[in-house]
Amino acid sequence: MKKTVVRLSLLFLLAFVFLYFFFRKVEWSEVLNYLTTVDLKYFVILIVITPIHFITRAIRWEYLIKHEKKRVKFSNRFSGYAVGFTVSFIFPGRLGELIRPLYVARKERMSKGFLLGTIVVERSFDIMIMCLLLGLFILSKPLYPSYFRAGEEAYSNLQLWGIIGVAIALFVFAVALFLYFFREKALSMIAFFLKPVPHGVSHKILQVFEEFIQGLKFFHSVGNLLVFILLSFVVWLGIIFYYWIFFLAYGFSFPYFFIIPYVFLTMVGASIPTPGMAGGFHYFSMVGMTSFLGIDKSQAVGMTIVVHAIQLVVTCLIGYAILWKEGMSLFQLKKLGEAAEE
């Protein structure tokens, strides 16, 4: 209990710090004005396409789980994403990442550990694909110098974040490969470190790790891997398109390709486990708009508040509708995730 309170306190403090820098030195009258000055045509399109990434992600997920079970309902995969993102928006700690595999495991009677393994693979590829797109963006700088209006320091910082992202993704990817291709050795190493732990507990942990390693099965199929990489590009190019429409709604007709650094920074911000993704998403979104797209800070603050609110409201409405239909509550899911963490 004490550990949970400390963790939550740190996350709320982190959110407060990011929000402080987000709101610092803005003209509130301008911010309020930018909350409403939007092209309604594009605004409606934006709301309609908000859940599109659940569809592309659900299609992609099939290629990770079909080795364990060939016919996992698309509706359950879609619902897993909708419910998982809803939990992440409402509760701190990115708990939705854990809820999603648990939810689908319960619906499809599948191994929880296996599905957790697929989440690690998925997240690693998400980071690597966005870092690759960012790398292509930075490499194109000499070809279109007139479009690159941000200062050298901004591009240098962006490159640093890209390198950090690649390093993290490659490390996780390497660990996943080691666990799968050197399964026995990996399990013996885990068992060695679990020696001080009571036998009953260590046995359960080892069992979870075995199921987790099973979730990495797709590495054995080159064709499957290539399709998954292609679908990962579809997921992120779709997300970039979403933000391109968002900027059109505010009268900014940026080239599609130049939305990449902004989307990369929002990915960094959203990965910070603050309550409701508040703070991290807001700060990095504002930095992306002001540093790389040349948008005034007050307008960037107003626009960020709007896009975050759209994503939160639309996602939560879909998530709550799914839970209402199934007779479940959000707090039941939260307890399920907390029990799994323990």
Image (tube, rainbow, N blue to C red):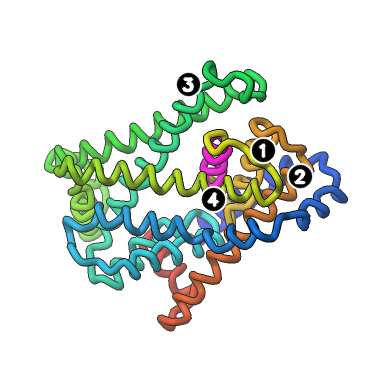
Q: Amino acid at mark 1?
A: Met
N-terminal label among 1 and 4: 4
- Would residue 253 be found to the left or right of residue 234 on screen? right
Where in the figure is residue 271, as x and y percent of width and height?
A: 51, 46
What kind of element bears circle 2? helix
User: Contact, CB < 8 Å: mark 4 with mark 2?
Assistant: no
318 to 256, vertically: above or below: below
In the picture of the structure, the residue carrying the numbered disc 3 is: 139
Pick the front one: 54 or 112? 54
Q: Which mark is residue 242?
A: 4
Numbered badge on residue 289: 1
Q: Is residue 5 magenta?
A: no
Judging by the rendered image, the residue that carries numbered circle 2 is: 299
Q: Label 3 sits on what residue type?
A: Leu
**207 lies left or right of 242:** left
Kindly check if marks 2 and 1 are in contact, taking CB atoms under 8 A apart as contact: yes
Q: CA distance from mark 2 to mark 3?
A: 29 Å
Residue in view at x 63 percent, y 21 percent: 146
Find out whether residue 267 is within the magenta segment.
yes
